[in-house]
Image (cartoon, rainbow, N blue to C red):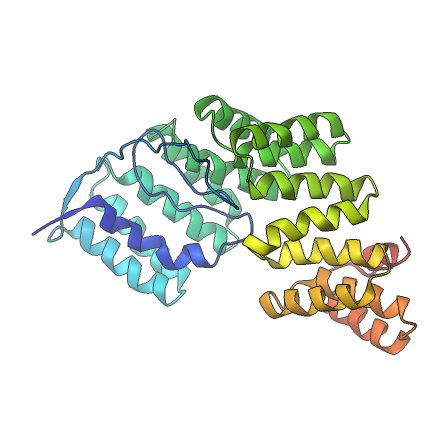
Amino acid sequence: MKNQLSRLLLVVAAAALAWLQGGAQVINSIGDENMKVERGLKPKEKKAETPYIVDIDTETPYFQYIDSAQNYIYSHDWPIAEQWLLKAFMADPENPSNSMVLSNIATLQRYQGKLSEAVKNYTLALDMTPHAVTLLLNRAALYVELDSIERAVDDYERVCELDMYDTESRYSLGVIAMERGDTKRAEDLFNEIRRINPNSGLYHEGMGLLYKRNGNYSRAAELFTQVIKVQPSAQLLAHRADCYLATKRLNDAEEDIRTALGITPDDPYLYVLRAKLNKLRFQRDDMNRDINTAVSLGLPRDYITTTLNE
């Protein structure tokens, strides 16, 4: 019995749901151009390359190991899933599908905090398919997490070279430029996204971050709202709540913080925002409780104190 390589996508389908905020993306083909969907609307004229499809014999150990990995991914047992994918790779080291297998191993390792190992496996996968856009984006995001910003920039710039329509790489480069204080470069990159796709959520989000950084909180909130209407996220709600706090729209800030906590209740920064809200309302006991919660979730108390005094 034969089955197309697309069946392999099921291996990481469940895992993809766990990585919604700027994390690793699932590889969905082994062609040189791995396409993905950005936050917001897709460019109207962007056309995906025809994926290179390989038939896999479902009776071989290689495919059976992948199938076993899928079962453990559905139950969020990342270590066991990783072991089965490693068995698949070892069972057939020359299989042309191994770029995808290695990428998914790296993603599972990233979930487990095994970041150095994840970098190595993304790199091995890229050695096999050096033009794989999604692989480059995954490794770049991991480099950012590891604070290897220059390596991340190299990967994002490589994606820009490979895909003139890619907006994720331009957004990430814009955020990096903004954090480095180069707001002109950041604005140019965000405007480039708009030229690619005038309705892009990434354009509005990037410009919202830029306006927020420059102190134009009202305009920033408007831009965040445009993205939230299409695709709400805890991160965007937190950004908008911060803008509302700066403009003393306390009830609106409270609503955004409440909604964001419903999405990611273990995000310590949301408790810092709520502490700031309670400070503005002179509710000191509630403020201290939120500060202690944020500390228990891993934020340094000194950072929290500095944030509250801004």
Q: In the picture provided, is 122 more to the left or to the right than 246?
A: left
What is the tally of numbered marks visible in this picture?
0
24 lies above or below 64: above
Task: From the viewer's side, name the closer residue of 24 and 91.
Answer: 24
**Residue drawn at point x = 51 percent, y = 54 percent:** 20
**Residue drawn at point x = 27 percent, y = 35 percent:** 51
Task: From the viewer's side, name the closer residue of 46 and 272.
Answer: 46
Which residue is farthest bottom? 285
65 lies above or below 271: above
Picture coordinates of residue 57, whole percent (x, y): 12, 48
**Residue drawn at point x = 56 percent, y = 35 percent:** 198
Picture coordinates of residue 127, whole percent (x, y): 37, 28
Task: From the viewer's side, name the closer residue of 247 and 213.
Answer: 247
Residue 202 seen anywhere in this rendered image of the structure: yes
Q: In the picture provided, is 288 more to the left or to the right than 95?
A: right
Q: In the picture provided, is 177 more to the left or to the right than 70?
A: right
Picture coordinates of residue 80, whole percent (x, y): 35, 61
Picture coordinates of residue 144, whole percent (x, y): 60, 39
192 lies above or below 54: above
**Residue drawn at point x = 80 percent, y = 75 percent:** 289
